[in-house]
Image (cartoon, rainbow, N blue to C red):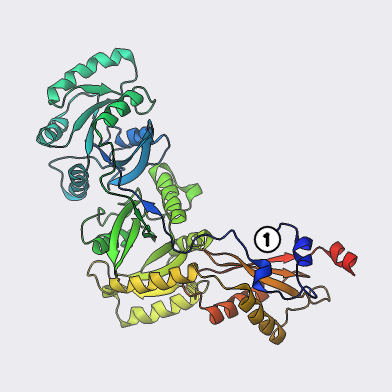
Amino acid sequence: MSDNFETDLAALPGDGIWSDESDWQLTDIEGADGAAEVEHMPVLAIVGRPNVGKSTLVNRILGRREAVVEDIPGVTRDRVSYSASWSGRSFTVVDTGGWEPDAKGLQQAVAAQAELAMRTADVIVVVVDATVGATATDEAVARVLRRSKTPVILCANKVDSERMEADTAALWSLGLGEPHPVSAAHGRGAGDLLDVILQKLPATPRETPVLGGPRRVALVGKPNVGKSSLLNKLAGTERSVVDNVAGTTVDPVDEIVELGGKVWNFVDTAGLRRKVRTASGHEYYASLRTRAALDAAEVAILLIDASQPITEQDLRVLSLIIESGRALVIAFNKWDLVDEDRRYQLDKEIDRELARVPWARRVNISASTGRSVQKLVPAMESALEAWDKRISTGPLNSWLKDVIAANPPPLRGGRQPRVMFATQASVRPPTFVLFTTGFLEAGYRRFLERRLREEFNFDGSPVRINVRVRDKREQRRKR
């Protein structure tokens, strides 16, 4: 389609009102099958005790700020994977939470994730704060790593000058080989460390690339609504750290899960606590990561605590999903805590608060018990089917002609606009363009969207309708 409306109209047959699909076939359409090459690259795990600069080193390796960093211990809790490359070689970097062998409670779960990362890595980089020296925790970490069959590289971080390099010699006592001095914050020595890492990493991927990537699903919602619990239930393992403390998840955590005979890529995201412009510290960067994860997803599962009233935070997250244009499934979690009175109240809240998305698929689940989580699969599949759907131009215009004949657009400025032609401009989400002789009121566009959904079944997907008005000067010239 050209950018010139008059040229487009001139291409129409007859009186320029209706056309055959062959005249208006668009070519800028995304593939509907989501096929992609998936490659299992060599894996590098970054481990160490809390607050030694692991996430800062990860960002330095990536060459961009991906991992959430703040000058307090314990910001990173889950193991988070990123794609990286150096000297033409690609590999996966896994950032981990602070590892303390004798940790309890939440920190014990964080340590378990770090240990799993080490077991699945091809190379382990253990990070030590050179300004502090080897602590008792560092020595405990070293004792475990010395028994590992996986190659281990010792990184002496926070070495900001040549004078400090001499102090790193004391780290030979850990028994992990030569300490490599690095300043992750400033980049000093990072290139030399990466050269050493490439010498240890396998030269080729561990698995052959396959065609047909999994559909990407973002688990989103306010803090402590059960996103990590749901991911763990779906994965059948403790993939995400779960704790009653709101905001346990900071970085997006992804996991490949097989459900309903298909492979899905689920991403557990940080709970959106407040507006990004008023957030601070790691909460601010966690919000940015959540938005990025949503933009990279194809379908979003919005988790809402069914046992509590729908809150402003829930609606803020919903607005974010609508803006992103992703397919949507609303999962009312903690259904095992909902009694009859609460169900009655919830029905009224849904009618009042979720009136913007009557098209969203809804599922009642309990992530902790596993109740009805399998119902998420058909809900996601139907939502993605609608998100990928394309309506041929001929049937679309035939349907639209009948709808407009029965319900013409309202007058505007004493004149009634005519819809001359319609076409589906893109999918993901389905976007339609109406070429008209005048502006269409928002209420009439909503009417057309509702009828479009009824006729072609776009349940689970947003639908966008754009209007392109023919220039009045061109109308006069054609007369």
Which quadrant is the C terminus positioned in?
A: bottom right
Q: Quadrant of residue 12?
A: bottom right
Q: Quadrant of residue 55?
A: top left
- Residue farthest toward the front in the current orientation of the protein: 22
Above or below for 179 versus 85: above
Q: Position of residue 233 (x, y in %)?
A: 24, 64
Q: Quadrant of residue 173?
A: top left
As rendered, which of 59 and 319 lies closer to the eye?
59
Left/right placement of residue 456 relative to residue 225 reads: right
Look at the image and tell me whether residue 383 can be seen: yes
Left/right placement of residue 183 relative to residue 16 reads: left
Q: Position of residue 315 (x, y in %)?
A: 47, 64
Regarding mark 1 in the picture, which secondary structure is present there? loop
As rendered, which of 410 and 435 lies closer to the eye?
435
Q: Position of residue 245 (x, y in %)?
A: 28, 54
Q: Amino acid at mark 1?
A: Met
- Mark 1 sits on what residue? 1
As rendered, which of 123 and 393 lies closer to the eye?
393
Which quadrant is the N terminus positioned in?
A: bottom right
Above or below for 425 versus 254: below
